[in-house]
Structure formats: structure tokens, C-alpha cells
Image (tube, rainbow, N blue to C red):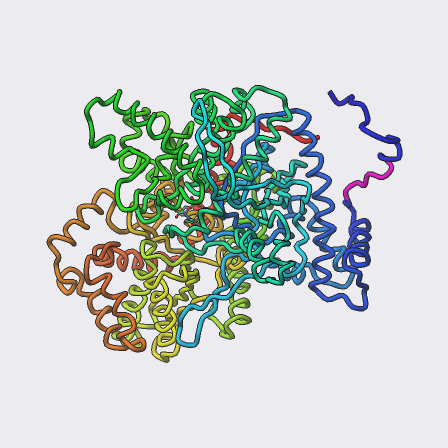
């Protein structure tokens, strides 16, 4: 209504005390100095860059908080339907630069910081990445939060506040990956708000006794506390500031007093250590499962705390539970939060005494499920005995859900026993396992994949039986997107300024309506514009070269073509194809005359990415890349034409340097294995061209920008299964299948790049089985790279491709993606905060 009664005390005193945003330079410097003096207890005499960064970040936080408060107040008053995005990882990167950009205050901060004797870029560099994620999945979640605030949608994220994020990657002298902890919270984190008043008790283990009407009482076991920490998510060009709530685990009682009094101090703190362990570290695996009890504890701890919070908020509205789906949509981002389904059943049935069938109706209208992979090794299954031990009540509920479900399948397909076994939530075996993806599918209103091809693969493979049971309309697609604020405006200010100047509209307009980039098309042929475009790229290449010089101590030729492959190390992503291709190129260069060499296109290849610490083959790939680089970079015959670098400790911030500097980037997974990929979108948005397989979002990028602007190669998805069959049952020796690749492997074996023996296990994956089909795609990969070289010779044509690529990337804004979810899935609407 707006005309509410003032809640307490003297309204005018309150209003007098309310601070307003610092929008001009002098109030910004005042607030920075204030934080130096008070929050940090320091002065101009002893303030270093880190301190200056902290004080400045605290001042930016104050400004964000005002909007955050307004936003939460508006949500409370207007009671819109909200969406909750449950994701076990959020790969946020740095916050400060993004915050001042979104607040529209970057210029003011720059000037204020300058007046105080510091440099904005230096302070930005002092912030540590919040690296609470492994890769694509976590970064997607971060982009979606940015877009939900920017599009004024009422969305909250929920996750865990890991004390240690993704490990720091070090490279040993022999090229091995070493892992070190990432203590990202060791200094003050200016951007989180501890909410010691928001706490929930979470139970593990114990006993579950069935009572009546399908209910049960779950008691005993271990209880730990979940404490909330809030992270503000500012929207671009709007006051709307959403929330990311992260849970930290704490012991319910500090320590066990009985043991303490008996002098057994270790025993006394045991329970408290075990409680704190739950949120201590992010699991460093991408696209594999692990089956560890602590991981299951993390999943339950996080989903139970988030649901308790969501239900408490819903209950304050004083509506019947049947209305929950009208007020809350809960997105399960992959299967990691699937325990939310039996947990909501438990709350409704056991605690709120809602009849089972009504509860199931509520559950299946509240949840939505996104799948991010079809790799069989990544599909989560939990052993029944482990679930029974850790979550006895949830296992009962899962069995009850399954019983009713299997009965309904039997009814629809009488006598089809194979089908029942295929669709059961419980996979037979020793031990039995719960198939989490199936639980997520049957417990959700809708299911989606993350790119057209991937969603279609889901419908025809993993979900096939479920499509036949529920009907096709339950299984949709939302193609991923990336935020153009971070992935263009922030990481590439030069290009952003050129686009704004060329389109002759305010930057805030195209950044929120990315299809407007199409306006660049009319300049794609214009030599003057092309020149400016090239200058921006060159500047970004020099910025990257400077970074490489300060981290690796080497100077690189910025006139060469920059070719980038950065992503997690995984066999299906085929960094091997790239490094084998490089070796092939090296041999070719060695075999030609110096005159002929002069005609070749100089190339600098960058790799970066982490391997899961237990993934032996992936770690060998890193070692190979580094040792190949060592040989090639030192060879006087070729070093002018080919250079290879592995940049250690890949992160969001390193990506922000690499993405704007690339001429081409590689997205070369075996067809049908990369669900979407999102860095492909980032590179294209920054005018880098793609070398890619017909996989994931590469396909849709080709559709948008024109296939002639992508260097596609390799077999198509439908051929893959058949080729694999051939490799298993009718293997052909690699010498026959692909002599060029055989030569490369033999040279590695022979010790050309260090002890050949070391690499045998890796080489054997290609020689035998070749599950990822390198031998099948190698020649067409080499051919595609040849086309790249030829195309690069004609710079004007190349620049036209680059401009066209960027201009047609509008579809891949995460704003479009989040609006798809809002409209087609969650049924939520924008709410503008005045
Ligand atoms: C990625 N998955 C997909 N998982 O591989 C990629 O194609 C897609 O673009 C992206 O999701 C976003 O949809 C991915 O990053 C993980 O890292 C999981 C993290 C948690 C443990 C299991 C793997």
C-alpha cells in the first residue's frame, strides 16, 4: 500500500538516520576514508593497496546494501512468486569491479581513489576470486544471478560457504600439477553479510520410526547448525539487488563438556570438528561422481537448510501449503540438490501433517530440474546402505515414492518388467543404488537440458522411458547464456566503448538487450571500423602478454595469432587433440625450408585449466603440454612460428584476460559429449572465432552467426556410437587409421618430449578403444586448422568474420536464458524496486 504505519520509535529520527547512496566523488572519498579509519582502524600513513581495496570495497558494499534492503522490503511487501536457484557451486570470481560497474559508479570511484593516491586497477587486482566452483556449472549459476537482478526478477541463490574454494594449481618443475589450498577467506571478505540470526538445526544419522498415515518420527543422531551468510547480487542499471545465501556448518554446542571436564580435550572437540568439516572444502571433481559420505552430507546440509528457510518464509505469508507452488519455484541445478525432493516430502508429511498424495502434488509443482551432462560417469547414484545410515527417513520416503511410481508405470505399461527395472529409482546390484537423476525427473514439474542438441539427447537416451511415460512436454530446453556485463563490458572495456560509440546508443541499452549488437553489421566491411576493431584486439593481446610476462617471465609475440583452449582438463574435452595437433604442426614446420617457414602464420597457443586431483590421465595431459611447450618454445628453427604456453591456476579472473585477447579458441569435444559449453559464447562475444566440433552450443552459435564463420570439423553425434562399436569389435591399427597421428604418438613414446614411458598410459587410451575418437577426428581437425591459417592471411575478411560473430551473439545473453526460465518454467514476473 505504501501507507503503512511506522513500525517503531520516532519516525523522523529514523528517517534522519537513514543514509543515502554515495553518488558523487566527494561522498565516495568520505566513505572510503571513514572505512579506513573505523572498519580497518588504519590511516593514510600505513595504508597499502590491500587496505585501500578493502576500505573501497566496504564503501561499495554500503551502496549495494541500500538497494539490497529496498529489494528485500519490496519482496516482503508485494509477495511475488519467487524462484530459488539451488546450485552446489557458484563461481563468482571478483565482485568489486562488477559491483561499481553495475551501480554505475565506476568513474566516480576511479576519480575518488585517484584523489586518495591509489590506482583503481591496482585495487581491483587485490581482490581474491570467490572460486566456489569447478567450471561451467558454477559459472553459469553466477551469470544467472547477475541476469536475474538485472532483469528485476525475484530470484535467490542458495549454496554452501566453503572455507576453501577450488584448489590452487601449481606446476612442478617436471610439469606435474600440484594442488594447494585456496584459503580465500583468510582476509576480511567485504562482500558477505553474516546472519547469525538465521540458523537452522540439521540432523544426520539416528532412527526413523514409522507411525501412522505414512508418517514417521526421525530422532537421535547428530545435529549441526546451518548459519546463513548473504552475498548481494546487484543488477545492472536497476536498484534490484538479489541475494545469494550461503550456509556455513557449525557445531550445535561448542564442545562436549563432559569429555572436556574429564580432561579428554580431543574427544571434546571431535563433534565440533566433524560439524565444521561439512562446509570446509569444495569437492574438486567435474563431471564425475565420488560416492563419499562427506559429499552426501554437504548435499543434505545445504538442501535442508535452504528448504527450511524457504518454508519459513512461505509460512509467514499465512497461506495453505497447497499454495506453495504459487509462491515458490525451486530450481534443482543438476542432481546435487535432489534430496530436496524427499526433504520437502518429509517436512510436509511428517511435520506439517499434509496427506502424502497432497504433499506429492505440491512437490511436483514446486521443483524444476536442469541436467548438465549425459556422461554416464557423471550421473549421480548413492548407495542405499549409505543413505540408510546417514538419512534413514529419506530412504524410507524414496522407497515410498518409488513404490507408488512403479505401480503407475505398471498400470500404463502392464507386464513390461524390463521397463519397470529400467525406470525404478533403485538400481539393483551390490549395493543397491538410488538413481538421483530419476528422482529429480519424477519429482519435478519440468526437466531441461542446456543446449538444443543436449536436450534432444536427453529425450532420446536418459529420459526416453520418462518421455514415454510423462509425455514430451515435460522435457524442454533452455540454451545457456553468459552475462554481457562481466564478459564484455567489464573484461573488455575497449570493445565496449567502441560498440557504444558505433551504435550511438547508451551502453546500458545494448548491454540489457544484446540483440542490439546487430547494429554493428553495417560496419562489418568498413575499413575504418575494422581498423578500430583490430586495435582493440591488439591492446587486449598486449594486456595478456603483460600478464604472461609477469607470471611466467616470458615475452610473447603479440603479432602472432592467439589460439586459446581454456577449460577443465577432461578426456572428453580433448585437450589431447590440440596438443597432438601442435606436435604435428611442429614436425611439419621442421620438415620445410626456412623460406617456406616464413610464409606460415605465426601462432601462440595458450592452454589453461585444472585437472581433478585424482584424475590421472588428465594430469598426464598437463604434463605433456608443458613438456611439449618446453621443447617447441626453445627450438630456434620454429620458435618464431609456434609457441605454446600453459598458464597455471586458471580462474575467472584469468579468463577475463584471455577471452578478450583470443583470435581463435578451441571447443573440440567428441560430438555429443559437451552439454553446452559457455566459454565458446564468451570468446565469440569478444570477436574471437571458434574452432569446434558439431557439439553443444557450438551448433547454435553456428546457426546464429553463420556456419561459414565457425571452423567446424569432426564426426557428428549420430556417428559416434557406431564408431565406438567399430573400435571395440573391429579395431584397426592406428598406423592404418591415421598415420599422421600414429607418428605423433610414436615420437612421444620415443622420448622426444621427455621420458616416453611417462606418457604410455595416456597414449594407450588413444591406441586402444579410443573412446573419444581422436583417430577419427584428427585429420579433419588438422584440415580445419589449415583453413584457419588461410583465412587469417586475409585480415580484412577475418575482421569481417570477427565483427559479424560479435554482432550476432545476442541470443547468448544470460538475460534471454533467465527470462526463458522465468516465463516457461517458474512463472515469475519482474518486480521493479522503486
Ligand atoms: C557443465 N558441467 C557442462 N559440471 O559440462 C557444460 O557443457 C555446460 O556448459 C555447463 O555445465 C553449464 O551448463 C559442469 O560444469 C560440473 O562441474 C559439476 C560440478 C559438481 C560436481 C559434478 C560436476
Image position, residue 827 (x, y; %): 51, 25
Q: Taking 190 as reference, is 431 left or right? A: left
Name the dominant secondary structure of the magenta segment: loop
Screen quadrant of the N terminus: top right
Question: In the image, is residue 730 above or below residue 541?
Answer: above
Spot the residue most to the bottom.
636
Question: In the image, is residue 7 above or below residue 27?
Answer: above
Image position, residue 231 (x, y; %): 63, 45
Spot the residue most to the left.
730
Image position, residue 128 (x, y; %): 60, 59
Screen quadrant of the C terminus: top right
What is the quadrant of residue 792 in the picture?
bottom left
Q: Taking 655 as reference, is 80 left or right? A: right
Identity of the residue drawn at 66% across and 50% down: 191
- Closer to us: 430 or 586: 430
Residues rendered magenta in the picture: 16-21
Question: In the image, is residue 307 above or below residue 666?
Answer: above
Image position, residue 265 (x, y; %): 61, 62
Identity of the residue drawn at 70% across and 31% down: 73
Amino acid at each position: 500500500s505504501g501507507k503503512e504505519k511506522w513500525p517503531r520509535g520516532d519516525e523522523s529520527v529514523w528517517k534522519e538516520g537513514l543514509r543515502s547512496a554515495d553518488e558523487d566523488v566527494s561522498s565516495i572519498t568520505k566513505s572510503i576514508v571513514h572505512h579506513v579509519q573505523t572498519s580497518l582502524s588504519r590511516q593514510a600513513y600505513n595504508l597499502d593497496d590491500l587496505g585501500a581495496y578493502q576500505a573501497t570495497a566496504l564503501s561499495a558494499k554500503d551502496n549495494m546494501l541500500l538497494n539490497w534492503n529496498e529489494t528485500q522490503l519490496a519482496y516482503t511487501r508485494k509477495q511475488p512468486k519467487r524462484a530459488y536457484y539451488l546450485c552446489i557451486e557458484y563461481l563468482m570470481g571478483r565482485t568489486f569491479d562488477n559491483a561499481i560497474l553495475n551501480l554505475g559508479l565506476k568513474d566516480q570511484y576511479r576519480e575518488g581513489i585517484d584523489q586518495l593516491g591509489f590506482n583503481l586497477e591496482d585495487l581491483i587486482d587485490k581482490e581474491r576470486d570467490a572460486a566456489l566452483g569447478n567450471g561451467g556449472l558454477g559459472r553459469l549459476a553466477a551469470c544467472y544471478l547477475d541476469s536475474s537482478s538485472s532483469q528485476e526478477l525475484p530470484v535467490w541463490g542458495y549454496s554452501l560457504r566453503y572455507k576453501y574454494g577450488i584448489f590452487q594449481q601449481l606446476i612442478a618443475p617436471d610439469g606435474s600439477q600440484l594442488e594447494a589450498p585456496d584459503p580465500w577467506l583468510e582476509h576480511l571478505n567485504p562482500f558477505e553479510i553474516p546472519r547469525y540470526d538465521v540458523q537452522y538445526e540439521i540432523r544426520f544419522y539416528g532412527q526413523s520410526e514409522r507411525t501412522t498415515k505414512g508418517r514417521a518420527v526421525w530422532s537421535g543422531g547428530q545435529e549441526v547448525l546451518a548459519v546463513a551468510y548473504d552475498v548481494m547480487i546487484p543488477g545492472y542499471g536497476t536498484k534490484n539487488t538479489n541475494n545469494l545465501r550461503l550456509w556455513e556448518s557449525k557445531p550445535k554446542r561448542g564442545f562436549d563438556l563432559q569429555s572436556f571436564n574429564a580432561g579428554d580435550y580431543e574427544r571434546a572437540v571431535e563433534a565440533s570438528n566433524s560439524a565444521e568439516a561439512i562446509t570446509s572444502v569444495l569437492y574438486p571433481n567435474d563431471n564425475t561422481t565420488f560416492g563419499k559420505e562427506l559429499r552426501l552430507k554437504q548435499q543434505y546440509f545445504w538442501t535442508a537448510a535452504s528448504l527450511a528457510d524457504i518454508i519459513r518464509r512461505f509460512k509467514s505469508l499465512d497461506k495453505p501449503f497447497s499454495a506453495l507452488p504459487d509462491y515458490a519455484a525451486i530450481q534443482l541445478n543438476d542432481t546435487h540438490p535432489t534430496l530436496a525432493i524427499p526433504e520437502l516430502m518429509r517436512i510436509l508429511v511428517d511435520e506439517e501433517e499434509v496427506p502424502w498424495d497432497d504433499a506429492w502434488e505440491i512437490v511436483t509443482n514446486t521443483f524444476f530440474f536442469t541436467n548438465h551432462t549425459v556422461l554416464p560417469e557423471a550421473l549421480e547414484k548413492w548407495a542405499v546402505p549409505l543413505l540408510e545410515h546417514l538419512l534413514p527417513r529419506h530412504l524410507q520416503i524414496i522407497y515410498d515414492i518409488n513404490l507408488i511410481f512403479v505401480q503407475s508405470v505398471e498400470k500404463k505399461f502392464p507386464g513390461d518388467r524390463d521397463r519397470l527395472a529400467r525406470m525404478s529409482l533403485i538400481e539393483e546390484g551390490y549395493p543397491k543404488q538410488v538413481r538421483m537423476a530419476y528422482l529429480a525427473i519424477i519429482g519435478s514439474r519440468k526437466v531441461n537440458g542446456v543446449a538444443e542438441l543436449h536436450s534432444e539427447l536427453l529425450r532420446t537416451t536418459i529420459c526416453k522411458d520418462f518421455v514415454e511415460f510423462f509425455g514430451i512436454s515435460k522435457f524442454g530446453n533452455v540454451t545457456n547464456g553468459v552475462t554481457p556485463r562481466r564478459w564484455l563490458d567489464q573484461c573488455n572495456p575497449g570493445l565496449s566503448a567502441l560498440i557504444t560509440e558505433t551504435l550511438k546508443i547508451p551502453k546500458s541499452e545494448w548491454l540489457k538487450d544484446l540483440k542490439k549488437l546487430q547494429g554493428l553489421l553495417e560496419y562489418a566491411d568498413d575499413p575504418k571500423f575494422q581498423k578500430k576493431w583490430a586495435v582493440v584486439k591488439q591492446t587486449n593481446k598486449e594486456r595478456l602478454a603483460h600478464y604472461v610476462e609477469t607470471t611466467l617471465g616470458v615475452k610473447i609475440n603479440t603479432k602472432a595469432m592467439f589460439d586459446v583452449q581454456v577449460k577443465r582438463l577432461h578426456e572428453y574435452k580433448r585437450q589431447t587433440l590440440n596438443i597432438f595437433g601442435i606436435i604435428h604442426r611442429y614436425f611439419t614446420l621442421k620438415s620445410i625450408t626456412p623460406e617456406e617457414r616464413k610464409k606460415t602464420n605465426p601462432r601462440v597457443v595458450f592452454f589453461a585449466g585444472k585437472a581433478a586431483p585424482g584424475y590421472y590421465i588428465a594430469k598426464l595431459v598437463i604434463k605433456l603440454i608443458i613438456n611439449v611447450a618446453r621443447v617447441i618454445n626453445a627450438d630456434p628453427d620454429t620458435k618464431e612460428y609456434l609457441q605454446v604456453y600453459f598458464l597455471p591456476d586458471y580462474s575467472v579472473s584469468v579468463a577475463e584476460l584471455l577471452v578478450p585477447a583470443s583470435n581463435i579458441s578451441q571447443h573440440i569435444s567428441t560430438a555429443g559429449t559437451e552439454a553446452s559449453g559457455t566459454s565458446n559464447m564468451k570468446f565469440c562475444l569478444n570477436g574471437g572465432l571458434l574452432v569446434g566440433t558439431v557439439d553443444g552450443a557450438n551448433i547454435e552459435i553456428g546457426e546464429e552467426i553463420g556456419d561459414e564463420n565457425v571452423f567446424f570439423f569432426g564426426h557428428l553425434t549420430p556417428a559416434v556410437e557406431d564408431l565406438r562399436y567399430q573400435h571395440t569389435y573391429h579395431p584397426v591399427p592406428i598406423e592404418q587409421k591415421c598415420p599422421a597421428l600414429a607418428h605423433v604418438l610414436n615420437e612421444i613414446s620415443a622420448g622426444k618430449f621427455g621420458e616416453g614411458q611417462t606418457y604410455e598410459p595416456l597414449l594407450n587410451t588413444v591406441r586402444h578403444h579410443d573412446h573419444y575418437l581422436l583417430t577419427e577426428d584428427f585429420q579433419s581437425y588438422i584440415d580445419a586448422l589449415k583453413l584457419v591459417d588461410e583465412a587469417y592471411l586475409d585480415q580484412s575478411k577475418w575482421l569481417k568474420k570477427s565483427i559479424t560473430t560479435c554482432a550476432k551473439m545476442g541470443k547468448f545473453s544470460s538475460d534471454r536464458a533467465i527470462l526463458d526460465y522465468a516465463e516457461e518454467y517458474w512463472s515469475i514476473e519482474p518486480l521493479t524496486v522503486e
